[in-house]
Image (tube, coloured by chain):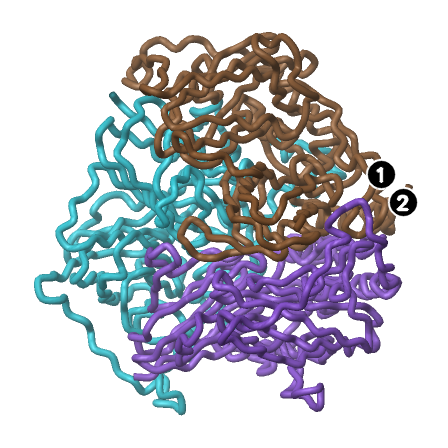
Chain colours: A purple, B brown, C cyan
Amino acid sequence: MTPDPLDQLDPTLGRRRFLQVSAAGAFLCTIGSERVAVARRGDAAKADAAAARIARPKARAAAAEPTESQTYVTPQPQPGGQKVEYWIQATTARWTIVPTKRDDWHGVAQPGGSTFTAVVYQQMTEGFAAAFGPAAMPGPTLHAEVGDTLVVHFRNNLGDLKQAVTMHPHGVKYNPEYDGVYLGDYTRAGGFIAPGEEFTYTWECVPESVGAWPYHDHGPNHTLNTFRGMFGSLVIRPKGEAVPIFEKSLFLHQLQPPVTGLKRSYQCINGRAFAGNTPTIRVKVGQEVALHVFGMDNNFHDFHIHGHRWKDASGAFVDTPTVGPNETTSVRFVEDNPGRWLYHCHVFSHQDAGMAGWYLVEQ
Amino acid sequence: MTPDPLDQLDPTLGRRRFLQVSAAGAFLCTIGSERVAVARRGDAAKADAAAARIARPKARAAAAEPTESQTYVTPQPQPGGQKVEYWIQATTARWTIVPTKRDDWHGVAQPGGSTFTAVVYQQMTEGFAAAFGPAAMPGPTLHAEVGDTLVVHFRNNLGDLKQAVTMHPHGVKYNPEYDGVYLGDYTRAGGFIAPGEEFTYTWECVPESVGAWPYHDHGPNHTLNTFRGMFGSLVIRPKGEAVPIFEKSLFLHQLQPPVTGLKRSYQCINGRAFAGNTPTIRVKVGQEVALHVFGMDNNFHDFHIHGHRWKDASGAFVDTPTVGPNETTSVRFVEDNPGRWLYHCHVFSHQDAGMAGWYLVEQ
Amino acid sequence: MTPDPLDQLDPTLGRRRFLQVSAAGAFLCTIGSERVAVARRGDAAKADAAAARIARPKARAAAAEPTESQTYVTPQPQPGGQKVEYWIQATTARWTIVPTKRDDWHGVAQPGGSTFTAVVYQQMTEGFAAAFGPAAMPGPTLHAEVGDTLVVHFRNNLGDLKQAVTMHPHGVKYNPEYDGVYLGDYTRAGGFIAPGEEFTYTWECVPESVGAWPYHDHGPNHTLNTFRGMFGSLVIRPKGEAVPIFEKSLFLHQLQPPVTGLKRSYQCINGRAFAGNTPTIRVKVGQEVALHVFGMDNNFHDFHIHGHRWKDASGAFVDTPTVGPNETTSVRFVEDNPGRWLYHCHVFSHQDAGMAGWYLVEQ
């Protein structure tokens, strides 16, 4: 195994240079009453311990604030719409960032150990009867149409981590019961799902929900949990709209030593780093393609596909749009350019540290 | 008082970890002939001393550059427009970042000392007769319509700081006399308002000025002064357009130890950190809402309101748009979702360090 | 010569403060089979040595991947279009970042040595007969219309650096032969132009190519080479569209000690820092103006011109739009505001470290 060059620096400068290069990996969490700096390997356990100490918020007496005494009704589908149900559990998963141990773009080995304990959303069959597939990063993409309700049966299956988690969606409409956010004393039922508990979220797909949106943990330990894999996407379409032949959600995010406990920093797409590990996209000339790209860390990114350009929401042609944390940029075109292409974040340091993949087009 | 976890680290790693987490707080200023690194507590005084050494630029002889011999006429309102006058002074103010000593989102104390000497724009009554209200961060929101001139009588009331300041607006039209920028030897009258002096800016509201824009100091010490509170907003409407029932300007910015002299870093909205201190927005279902969101530091941000989404300028629905330094993103919708909601920057580290607030909707 | 304040700090804190301020200058390169941290002066030579060790990729046997056995035809102009030819070579050039040794905005000396060995694209006359002008940063702006092909005869004239380079364009259409990207074992002819070699790229100007786009090195050492000057722009117009009276490409990027070997960090526009060194733009009232602004480093920027505002692609008026790495934001208006104006990146630290220039408008 080739040692990482950052581990081989001379004793005086080594650590400092590492700090320079990896500084973006440090972050500060507010977890209930505690502030935890997650800045080096081992700190994640401190954040988990803080999260485990948070008691379930007490039901708040109807207070001076009118918003606390308001009551909310579970929404129903619009006429012609349907209830689209999912069963999803939060679970830990041993996750390997570079399963091929290779960077297929540069044609070289990336041998180091890249397996850590991720926390992810896993799709289950009806009634949580069985896993729909292996636990993976990102969580399942949830699909619905305008007029539908998305009904997500959510279970916290994080035994060892002993902390409450949630699902907080973007884009859809929901009342405060289904916001999926820990708010201290103002927390409602959907904002604190303790280990072993279940909760059913009901979200409305309104006309303004059309598009692709992220979901992620927004419980007491949301920053660390999101950074280690608790995210996925929603795709809401106008009623009856055809599904593109190829559609995929791509999350741009880092997996850094303070989060993973690993020695190396990785710049990832969907939890994987380096071409051949990140999603390899395979399409054919003439197919409709839709890629939904999300920022999912503390950084800003921009997204480029070689050989392609597309209209942004304003109608301008672009090939490298900026995307911020939990923002979406959608790429849509009819494929017209056969070949082996690279897609990547255009922040050069991200691209070089793994945030790139293959986009393959057959004639 | 709970010590900050960053101050409790072991002696070897403590300082380094602090650097990692707070590195964004360091910046380099060019102040006249001096370069000052503002990187730790105490450095702001060096920048102030450098600013105090800057002499008023000499009137420049009509030079080879044609632009220097051009003369400019003070603009008048368009037919039907009016002269909208404000009286504003630059002043220091003891400012408390966390007045409740509490983070109401997490339901926990935030006890540390958070008071420092800010520099702000304070609205005065006509002729500077009296303060319109307490000096606060941000400065007043200036309102006008297309066809009007905004006439701002500005006074530098910074006795102790002994440095020239200005008001530089975005979005409106102005000639070089009213640019409010220090340009060394090319400085015009409005670009160097020394302590005790007054200057009247006249800015035109042209059709392309419609929108919300920031203003800020652009004198010799503009970076430090903007970072410690010298900013506010302009809202320019088409002639006769109705004012939204609820409208507010929100500035996303950090207040860091090198600027404040405090021990802790804060990620702020309008000079305050943590829900219950940042603006609590209170609206009712059916009301028109307009929020104007500005980046006001060295960082990029993105802005999210739980339970809501809105059309951006391109017509796409968004709920977490990116906003850069001195850029504006405006949020407009008719309120339709009652409840207690969180609004926040979606850079996770900013959110956890205070850049979040309550958005309360009554039925 | 005035010493840089960052070099005069006390021994204990000096280096740390420098790291804080300059951390953005460090980056990690993947160069073939090696990872090189470019974090301090001298590291660039290590990246160059790694790049020099990369052998020409072997022609890949038609593999399991259908994309590898596909063949591609060199595109021809559309009916009515033409073949627009350029001759361009990669070359080193001694480049001075602050030739006036002065910051004309602040009216002060910027005396330090600011000359380093840049690597740039230099335009040559037909058949590489002679230099079209001195080697400069950025490379030439390439112009074409929809329906044309851009035919770029490219030569690697980097004798001493002993490494392959390429030209990778954005916005135009090309098949994999003309992508100009090193892809390890999947590299095609245009992705590895060794010293002394020539290659002719053919790129199609399709209707969706209208706009301004960057080009840059995408060979094995692309990050370092792009950061030291291997970039330029393409401007593609609808057929027959009039050229604006004033049009210019502006690249926002840093030149940092790890790249330049210099003592100081510079925030640059087109390879130059500080007003009077960065491009001075000279226009007249009534002229059509088009500025194409590109991010060309690891950072995000936003672009402001005093006294002006313009429509973005969505039709909204802006004066400080965000622009990411290799993204483009175009500024277009009819000049209506005479005077001496400042244009700059609105990230305050970038502005103060040189990313600003003069915009001069005659009546």
Residue B2 numbered mark, or none: 2
Q: Residue furthest right?
A: B1
* Vertical side of B37 occupied by A35: above or below: below
Residue indicated by mark 1 = B112
Q: Residue at x 58, y 24 (%)?
A: B221
C318 to the left or right of A86:
left
Pointer 1 indicates a residue of which chain?
B
- The type of residue carrying mark 1 is Gly
Decide which of C174, A181 is in the foreground and name it: A181
Query: Residue B307's x, y, as percent?
Result: 62, 57
- Residue A182: percent from left, percent from top: 76, 59
- The amino acid type found where label 2 is placed reads Thr
Q: Which residue is painted at 38% across and 40% down in the image?
A: C317
Q: Is residue B20 above or below residue A335?
A: above
Which percent across, then down, holds residue B316? 44, 57
Work out whether residue A204 can be spotted.
Answer: yes
* Discs 1 and 2 lie in a common subunit: yes
Disc nearer the start of the sequence (1/2): 2
Q: Quadrant of residue A299?
A: bottom right
Q: Is residue B361 left or right of residue C179?
A: right
